[in-house]
Amino acid sequence: DGALNTASLPCISMDDPQRHRLDSLLAESKAMRSTEPGQDVEELVDVLRQVVRCAEVVDASAVVDEESPQVTASTMSGKRTVQRVAVQRASVGEAAALLAQGPVLVAEALPRLSGKRVLDFMPRLVAAAGKVPADYEVQTCGGQVQVHRAPLAKYIQLLQGSSADMAYLMKTSEVLCRPELAEFAEPPACCRLGEPGGLEALLPSVPCELLVGGAHAKSSLHRGSLCCGTWIFLVLGKIRWHVFPPTAAQGLSASRGALGSGVSPFDSFAAAGRDEHAPGRPGPPLAVGAESLEVEQTMGELLVLPPGWFQQAQLEDRCLALVGQFITEETAAAAAREIGPWLAARLPAEAAEAGRPPPQG
């Protein structure tokens, strides 16, 4: 990786999807050095690296400073979608205040995992945690899910064979907790608390999870604790999301988990209550489905959901993402609005189950 005279290189013009695919391919090829070493792999990495350098001549001026982002906003076109935000050069507080208004997609929010830095992350991930075993799902066309366990590096090799008939999905907290990867588990600047004041106690003990999956895999339709929002940074691939506001909770028939978290039995990607690849998981009622927003997340984008919002992902390519929960001064008010009614409804029910009168006042 020595210094090159970029003036001597040809310029290759690429649109964003092409560049994302190139970066993804190079990252996967570099990761193969640890699992499938050989001359062919080295030659492939060298060729891809030269192509990346040529493409970088075109966009070398795209440099972002994480500590001083600025916010500009626009609306995605098409079916009901979420707001897109570009973070460039203003205060983190202004960015967080905008995020507190509703779900948003944020570009340039995690410079340490953007551009060519993605290419460095994959080899570090495999070197530090390739032998760490973790659970993963095998999702079949009949809607059945089998849980298996394998080292991360071996699991990654399976993803190329992911299909509608047999899709692979892993979401684990067992990888990013390693000290060598601690910097990547840190939340984006716009999802960090300002001064410690007790709110940090509401955060989960696991700061960040790793999501790795193949094309056609789906997550459950779920939400986390009502105390926290959710952030998802897509390192590689492309994900289509359906997200639902807190008002859809009853219609989604979600189970009741800790602090308002829950999982719905529905598959929001099923058309009119049916899904040819998952007949056992019907779609949500039409009235509830109408409340959903659709999000198309591409490599390098951050999806931020306020407290109480449900989410379901469908992977359209091999994907790797970081997933965490957060609370800021700006989102704390939204969390209070959601958890208050949940507690009011929960306490009388629990009192009735215990055979005692509900609390008064």
Image (spheres, rainbow, N blue to C red):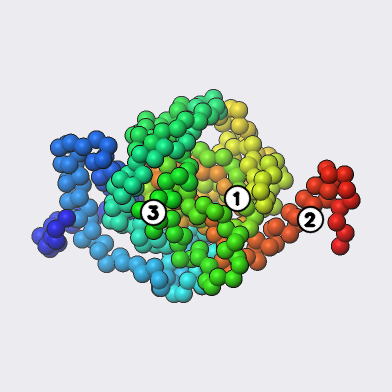
Circle on res. 324: none
Q: Quadrant of residue 360?
A: bottom right
Is label 3 or label 1 in front? Answer: 3
Q: Is residue 357 above or below residue 146?
A: below
Residue 299 visible in the displayed image: no
For the residues marked 3 and 1, what is the alpha-carbon distance in whole angstroms? 25 Å
What percent of the width, then of the height, locates residue 151? 38, 36
Q: Earlier in the sequence, mark 3 or mark 1?
A: 3
Q: Which residue is mark 1?
A: 224
Inspect the image, locate mark 2, and give the three-letter code of the amino acid beneath it. Answer: Ala
| Residue at disc 3, secondary structure | helix
Q: Residues within 10 Å of mark 2 (few under 14, many from 20)?
A: few
For the residues marked 2 and 3, what is the alpha-carbon distance in whole angstroms? 41 Å
Give the quarter of the figure containing the C terminus.
Answer: bottom right
Q: Which residue is mark 3?
A: 179
Circle on res. 344: 2
Residues marked 1 and 2 touching at CB (< 8 Å): no
Q: Is residue 125 above or below residue 274?
A: below
Residues marked 3 and 1 touching at CB (< 8 Å): no
Q: Is residue 219 above or below residue 330?
A: above
Q: Residue at x 41, y 73 (%)?
A: 68
Inspect the image, locate mark 1, and give the three-letter code of the amino acid beneath it. Answer: Gly
Q: Residues within 10 Å of mark 3 (few under 14, many from 20)?
A: few
